[in-house]
Image: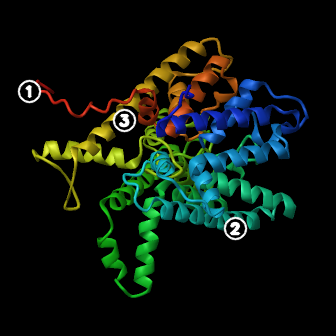
């Protein structure tokens, strides 16, 4: 008798792989050697930390710098690296280094894990992704080490440089400085510039960097002028760069004017510190949980605006989470097209298909539904919490988890076991994407596109 075959869909393999990675990380963190006092950490906190690192979120129930030993911090760092690039991408990189051939099934899994539109050139793309990632992380670690060396012994400075470089590029937001994250460096130009650069670089998405580096290379070789290359940018790259710039500038300006006189956040900082903190807050609120101002002291308007930034997140095929800049841009362009009474969605003399709009709306609706559901459930599970919270705190926490940001209003350590489970699920949804998870549970139907029904008008608006 033939043995039954278990053929998992690529999305199912992806979901199962992340679950196993979280479980393995939790088991390693549960070992007494992982904690600073050589005792076993409560397993729910191990799962929470492993999920937060694997999903490159940054929310923590325990102080990373104080609670975990060197071994525990290394486990967290490895989970961040694997989670940021995706275990399938790293597995493919190892196979390529070993000289193995990448099969069609593996190419399909890579396509699903990176959310790419086509399978052609995937192996070449993975090679670029690996080289680019480790090169940027090395540069970030080098400059951060030089800065930390002024405050720590060389060996410790190297460790901090590597940890924070990987954490920033992967948009994880974990730090090993203490409970105040990067607040001691609020007006430090090196820390602010390097961390923001790493976060933005990881959040733009690898396809954008492929195009940017390719264009720069051709401009240097004299094949085209830089202006010509910019004009030849794909619509994807143009939308990512413009949307990201608008969100960063808008977030920085809004934060500066709302918080510059707030003594609970940046009111006591120097002018330079206020500018740095406003820009830093705008950048990291998109998907990295570092902070140089106390989020619990934010004014309500700033906290709500930050929640929207967290839900939008970074760009596709990068280390960031959220709805993604492209989805937000496409929906906005669709609204503008409808207001202008246009039949199609246009941008930069290119039309955008309604299939892309449908995908963008699907992701947005599912993420907003998850945000509302998670916030409501937290308001029930945390009703007896010792933390004096408002609903905005819970909304902020849920958005941070779904956007894989890692910022908090201070409620995370006080969450109940049920609340921690809710946040873990949110981080998992945010990292893999609600559509990927939904598809993994759907049974395949090869004939689903062969049946067409007559159209009928309905009233809207």
Question: Is residue 450 visible in this depiction of the protein?
Answer: yes
| Label 2 – label 1 distance at C-alpha | 60 Å
Q: Which residue is mark 2?
A: 143
Disc number placed over residue 348 in the picture, else none? none
- At 40% from the left and 27% from the top, the residue drawn is 442
Q: The residue tagged with tag 1: helix, strand or loop?
A: loop
- At 48% from the left and 62% from the top, the residue drawn is 125
Residue 422, above or below 191: above
Q: Is residue 236 left or right of residue 310?
A: left
Dividing the image into 4 quarters, which one contains the N terminus? top right
Q: What is the crowding at mark 3: few (fewer than 14 residues within 10 Å), some, or many (at least 20)?
A: many
Dividing the image into 4 quarters, which one contains the C terminus? top left
Q: Position of residue 408 (x, y in %)?
A: 60, 35
Between disc 3 and disc 1, the foreground one is: 1
Q: Is residue 189 left or right of residue 378?
A: right
Q: Earlier in the sequence, mark 2 or mark 1?
A: 2
Disc number placed over residue 364 in the picture, else none? 3
Question: Is residue 60 visible in this depiction of the protein?
Answer: no
Q: Position of residue 61 (x, y in %)?
A: 70, 31
Q: Which residue is mark 1?
A: 457
Q: What is the crowding at mark 1: few (fewer than 14 residues within 10 Å), some, or many (at least 20)?
A: few
Residue situated furthest right in the rendering? 38
Front residue of 273 and 62: 62
């Amino acid at each position: 008798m033939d043995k039954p075959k278990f053929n998992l869909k690529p999305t199912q393999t992806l979901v199962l792989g992340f679950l196993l990675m979280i479980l393995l990380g939790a088991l390693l963190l549960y070992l007494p050697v992982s904690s600073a006092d050589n005792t076993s950490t409560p397993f729910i906190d191990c799962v929470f930390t492993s999920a937060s690192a694997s999903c490159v979120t940054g929310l923590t129930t325990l102080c990373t710098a104080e609670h975990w030993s060197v071994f525990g911090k290394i486990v967290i760092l490895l989970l961040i690296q694997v989670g940021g690039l995706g275990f399938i991408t790293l597995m493919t990189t190892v196979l390529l280094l070993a000289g193995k051939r990448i099969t069609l099934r593996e190419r399909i899994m890579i396509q699903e894990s990176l959310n790419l539109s086509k399978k052609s050139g995937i192996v070449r793309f993975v090679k670029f992704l690996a080289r680019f990632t480790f090169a940027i992380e090395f540069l970030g670690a080098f400059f951060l080490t030089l800065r930390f060396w002024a405050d720590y012994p060389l060996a410790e400075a190297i460790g901090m440089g590597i940890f924070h470089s990987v954490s920033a590029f992967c948009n994880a937001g974990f730090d090993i400085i203490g409970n105040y994250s990067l607040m001691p460096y609020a007006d430090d130009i090196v820390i602010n510039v390097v961390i923001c650069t790493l976060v933005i670089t990881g959040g733009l998405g690898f396809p954008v960097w492929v195009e940017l580096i390719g264009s720069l290379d051709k401009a240097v070789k004299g094949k085209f002028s830089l202006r010509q290359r910019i004009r030849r940018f794909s619509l994807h790259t143009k939308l990512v760069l413009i949307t990201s710039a608008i969100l960063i500038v808008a977030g920085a300006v809004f934060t500066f004017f709302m918080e510059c006189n707030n003594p609970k956040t940046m009111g006591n900082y120097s002018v330079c510190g206020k500018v740095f903190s406003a820009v830093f807050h705008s950048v990291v609120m998109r998907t990295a949980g570092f902070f140089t101002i106390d989020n619990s002291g934010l004014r309500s308007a700033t906290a709500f605006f930050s929640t929207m930034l967290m839900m939008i997140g970074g760009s596709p095929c990068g280390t960031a989470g959220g709805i993604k800049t492209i989805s937000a841009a496409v929906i906005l362009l669709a609204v503008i097209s409808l207001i202008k009474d246009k039949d199609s969605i246009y941008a930069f003399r290119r039309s955008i298909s309604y299939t892309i709009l449908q995908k963008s709306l699907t992701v947005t609706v599912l993420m907003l539904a998850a945000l509302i559901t998670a916030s409501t459930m937290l308001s029930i599970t945390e009703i007896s919490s010792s933390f004096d919270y408002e609903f905005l705190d819970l909304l902020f926490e849920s958005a941070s988890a779904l956007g894989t940001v890692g910022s908090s209003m201070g409620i995370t350590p006080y969450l109940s076991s049920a609340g921690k489970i809710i946040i873990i699920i949110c981080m998992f949804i945010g990292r893999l994407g609600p559509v990927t998870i939904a598809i993994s549970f759907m049974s395949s139907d090869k004939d689903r596109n062969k049946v067409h029904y007559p159209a009928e008008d309905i009233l809207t608006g």
